[in-house]
Image (cartoon, rainbow, N blue to C red):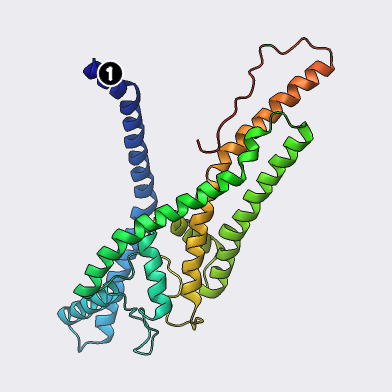
Amino acid sequence: MPHARLCSCWGGRVLPLLLAYVCYLLLGATVFQLLEKQAEAQSRDQFQFEKLRFLENYTCLDQRALEQFVQVIMEAWVKGVNPKGNSTNPSNWDFGSSFFFAGTVVTTIGYGNLAPSTEAGQVFCVFYALVGIPLNVVFLNHLGAGLHGHLATLERWEGQPRRSQLLQILGLALFLTLGTLVILILPPMVFSHVEGWSFGEAFYFAFITLSTIGFGDYVVGTDPSKHYISVYRSLAAVWILLGLAWLALTLPLGPLLLHRCSQLWLLSRGLSLKDRGAPEMDGLPRPQKIPISA
């Protein structure tokens, strides 16, 4: 009966997955609380101490005036205005920065450090995202389908010599290594040099960006004390699009590479046992062919 099948599906698949999902969230909440809560308390105490010291040094101000000034700073920050520097700071809405913002919209990164403040800009952002997000998904899916077509020969490797199989695995591993170097290693080195971050901070920014988490604690091209080239943020937006495309292309390759390596190891083991005069490996499971599109 449909009701019985539904209960069986819920109890056999959905419920264990739901429990694992909730447990994973609980684990993350516990670890983040242990790691971050004390640091947050120290930062809050330090901020209050600095406010009190500021009032002691400038007795012409009272607590209310200082709080109003802090509120002005917070409102400026929410609207994307960096409180550092002066009115000569570069605009957050020049073409390069606007291109970078458009990229964060269609890729759903949404750093949160910049958003439209006018009603017209907010309305346009809604309709722009409604069209741009599906367009971005279709673009990435087509790139993935293109790679699947180029790697279709890997599905027909079982009749090839073992040396040819090994060369294909090495080529696939080299492709993944070079892609990781170009997308996840070299750009953080550039960001570290330009922004003055450590490599760990730059790599953290790259991962948070390409995973589309986008916390907004690290964003390129926002330091008013630095002089960036005019196309810096536009190049960063291009890197984001290329990085997301590379991830869409290569995510299916990891399981494929592991499967091919296990197949080759099983074949090599079977051949070596046969060479030593061992009986036929009738019990050895024959490697199954996994479609690339799976």
Quadrant of the snapshot with the N terminus: top left
Q: Is 197 in front, or is 9?
A: 9
Q: Position of residue 131 (x, y in %)?
A: 32, 60
Furthest toward the top, the residue is 279
Q: Position of residue 172 (x, y in %)?
A: 66, 45
Q: Residue at x 21, y 74 (%)?
A: 120
Whether residue 172 is visible, yes or no, is: yes
The answer to whether residue 147 is left or right of residue 82 is: right
Q: Position of residue 87 (x, y in %)?
A: 34, 89
Q: Is 238 in front, or is 2?
A: 2
Disc 1 is placed on an element classified as helix
Q: Which residue is mark 1?
A: 5
Q: Residue at x 37, y 61 (%)?
A: 106
Q: Is 150 in front, or is 255?
A: 150
**In the figure, residue 3 lies in which quadrant?**
top left
**In the figure, residue 262 lies in which quadrant?**
top right
Q: Position of residue 185 (x, y in %)?
A: 59, 59
Q: Residue at x 61, y 46 (%)?
A: 150
Identify the amino acid type marked 1.
Arg
**Crowding at mark 1 (Cα within 10 Å: few <14, some 14-19, many 20+):** few
The answer to whether residue 99 is left or right of residue 52 is: right
Q: Is residue 83 above or below residue 218?
A: below
Furthest toward the left, the residue is 64
Whether residue 216 is visible, yes or no, is: no
- Total labels: the figure holds 1
